Image: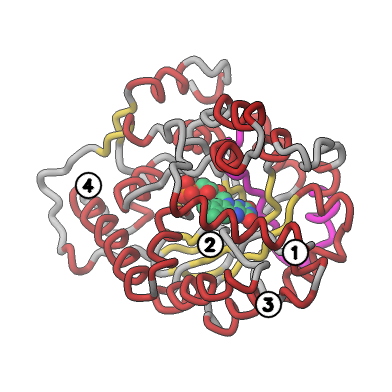
Amino acid sequence: SRITSSRKREHLEICCDRQVEAGFSGFDDIRLVHNALPECDMSKIDTGVHFLGNKLKSPLFIAAMTGGHPDTAEVNMRLARAAQHFNIGMGVGSQRAALENPELEDSFTIVRENAPDAFLCGNLGAVQLVEKGIEWAERAVEMIDAQALCIHLNPLQEAIQPEGDHDSSGCLNAICELCSSFKHPVIVKETGCGISYETAAKLWGAGVSAIDIGGLGGTSWAAVEAVRADRDDLAETGRIFSDWGIPTAVSLVESSRFKGPVIATGGMRSGIDIAKSITLGATLGGMALPLLKPAMTGEEALFKRIELINRELVVSMYLTGAKSCQELAQVRTYITGITGDMLKNNKIPELK
Ligand code: FNR
């Protein structure tokens, strides 16, 4: 667990200081239809949403990032204070290190201490779920008194790490078992390569409560591994795979053709992207990297960034004539370029 813990800290530093974004999210190919006659009062626009029985003030979701190293506690505290202040949801980073070594729990428990009323999600890797089962899932939720548990999938990152877990057999079965007996909602999330229509069908079939698509176009774990690599061949593999995956906008359309709610994460970079994601079927729009940088600077920088994103969302809603996120979901979009081509040439009859 000492290795897991020090890697957490290294990840934060690399993500802040180096170029770790790769690929494209597809949101540049999406355009919201402008409404020159909004016929409403911008100050009365309500960005509130319901998600898994919780009322949130904005669809902006603080995506899973950190915890598990004493140095990450301050960042988690600031993110938690933001979640509490803005009444938005937040996911913590993988709790594996703290489950292995309870001395590291403080960097997670600080989140609930600073966000007593916020919607919080725990986080565990699918591979750990296979090994440790529901006992770890329960301990992860208890640690932060979470409302839901995220199970993350990261086969690309594991595959290119020499010390990674290269056997993902049994993940779907473990998710299925967890969903059938767990008292809390289970959210399955990718971490930068997206969820396809076929994978979404399997996950909804397993009984998940929500999917976080974690698509291509934002933070690339292959790019992070390329920076971390101490061998040229490993760095090369990381670079080669840094734009592997399904663009977030495409993954979103494919995954939201089912009944359950979807979180759009991966390369969401403004309130306009959040608005676009809602018109494509998302309930929430998650951001990691854009919030990490101000969170490392300080609480004021983080609060300002979130205010800006929320304002961009409100202006987007006003300019499409949407007074609520429900109305925004009905707004028409133009889909062009590679994103349009991918959605047309996907061989999924229902999506055409
Ligand atoms: C992450 N992400 C992540 N996801 C997860 O499920 N468990 C984790 O522990 C982490 N850790 C983590 C650390 C850091 C520093 C970053 C930037 C990201 C992935 C994250 O939740 C998200 O899915 C992707 O980063 C894509 O979103 P962005 O960064 O493009 O907005």
Instruction: Kindly identify the amino acid type of the residue bearing the numbered disc 1.
Output: Ala
Instruction: Kindly identify the amino acid type of the residue bearing the numbered disc 3.
Output: Asp
Q: Position of residue 78 (x, y in %)?
A: 46, 75
Q: Which mark is residue 145?
A: 3
Identify the mark nearer the N-term, 1 or 2: 2
Q: From the viewer's perspective, is the residue at label 2 or at label 3 nearer? A: 3
Left or right: residue 186 versus residue 294 is right
Q: Position of residue 245 (x, y in %)?
A: 56, 30
- Residue hosting label 4: 320
Instruction: Kindly identify the amino acid type of the residue bearing the numbered disc 4.
Output: Thr
- Residue hosting label 1: 97
Give the CA separation, mark 1 to mark 2.
28 Å
**Would residue 254 be seen by someone viewing this image from the given angle?**
yes
- Residue hosting label 2: 51
Instruction: Kindly identify the amino acid type of the residue bearing the numbered disc 2.
Output: Phe
Identify the mark nearer the N-term, 3 or 1: 1
- Which element type, helix, strand or loop, lies under badge 3? loop
Residue 159 against residue 339 in the figure, above or below: below
Q: From the viewer's perspective, is the residue at label 4 or at label 3 nearer? A: 3
Please report the bounds of the magenta region as a residue range: 175-197
Label 2 crowd bin: few (<14), some (14–19), many (20+), radius 10 Å: some
Q: Is residue 196 magenta?
A: yes
Label 4 crowd bin: few (<14), some (14–19), many (20+), radius 10 Å: many
Give the CA separation, mark 3 to mark 1.
17 Å
